[in-house]
Image (spheres, rainbow, N blue to C red):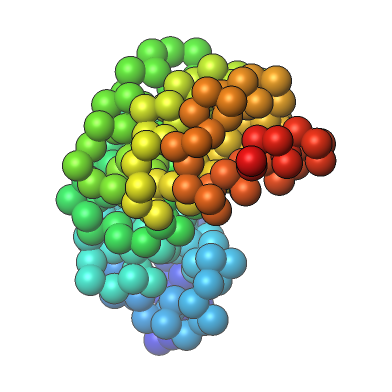
Amino acid sequence: MDGDDTCHLVRRARSVGDPLLARVVTDTAEDVVVAFARTDGDVAAARRVARRYADLGPAERSALLWSDDPGGRLVAVVLLLQAARAHPDPELTDEYLSALRAERLDDPALVDLAAEELVGAPLLGGSTGPLFALAKSDVALVRRAAVVATLAFAKQGDAEVPLAVAGRLVRERGEVVQSALGWVLRETGKRASQDALVAFLERQGRFLGRAALETATEHLPDAERDRLRG
C-alpha cells in the first residue's frame, strides 16, 4: 500500500466512523519521512507533505520534531504552523521552543519559517516579556527566534518591540543573530516606522556587522542610506 492509498483509507475510516480501521491505517512519523524523501526536499515540498499528513497525531508529530532526519524536522515545523493556524494553542509554541532550546532544530531556516507565527503572533496584545527572555538564551537560534518573532509586531505597525529586542542583541557578533537583525530591522523600517529605524541606527548602527547594516538600510532613501553606512 502506498502513501496515497494510506491517506485515502484514513479519510474513509474517519468518514464512516470506523475506529478499528482508523487505528490500523494511522500514519506514522516514518511514513512522513519516507514521503518527504521522495520530494525535492524544499519548503514547498514540506508544505505539500504536511497538507497530506495534516491528521498526523501529536505523538507522531513530536517524534518527527525530535528525529535525526532534517526533512522530518522541517515537515514537523510546518505541521506545527498548520495546527497553530487552525487552532491557536500555547502548547504548540511550547513544543516548538522546547525543540529549539534543546538544539534539535539546528537550521536557521526553521526559525525564519516559524518564529513569527509560533512565537511572536501569540504575544500580540499581551506581555512581550517572553521575547526578552528568549533574547537571553544561551542558544544562538533561540536568540534568533526572539528577533524573527518581532516581525509579528512590525507587521502590525509596532516598531517599539522589534527595536527593543534588537537593542538587546545588536552587539552580538555571531552571524546567526546578526543576519536576522539585518532583515528584521529592514522590515521594521518598511512596515512600521522608517523614522524609528533611522533613530535606532543613529544610536546603535555602529554595533551591527557590515552585512547586517547594509541589509537594514537597503530600502532607505539614498542619502540616508549612505549617511548611516558611513
Q: Residue at x 35, y 47 (%)?
A: 173
185 above or below 105?
above
Q: Please state which of residues 120 and 169 is positioned toward the viewer in this rendering.
A: 169
Q: Position of residue 94 (x, y in %)?
A: 27, 37
Q: Residue at x 23, y 71 (%)?
A: 68
In the picture, measured across the screen, residue 143 lies left or right of residue 88, that is left
Q: Residue at x 75, y 33 (%)?
A: 224
The quarter holding residue 2 reads: bottom left
Q: Position of residue 223 (x, y in %)?
A: 80, 36
Q: Please state which of residues 132 and 44 is positioned toward the viewer in this rendering.
A: 132
- Quarter of the image with the N terminus in it: bottom left
81 above or below 127?
below
Q: Position of residue 115 (x, y in %)?
A: 44, 42
The quarter holding residue 133 reads: top left
Residue 13 can be seen, yes or no = no
Q: Please state which of residues 151 and 51 is positioned toward the viewer in this rendering.
A: 151
100 above or below 193?
below
Q: Residue at x 70, y 35 (%)?
A: 227
In the picture, measured across the screen, residue 177 lies left or right of residue 102, that is right
Q: Tell how many labels.
A: 0
Residue 40 can be seen, yes or no = yes
Q: Position of residue 12 (x, y in %)?
A: 48, 64
Residue extending farthest to the front is 230
- Quarter of the image with the C terminus in it: top right
In the picture, measured across the screen, residue 49 lies left or right of residue 63, that is right
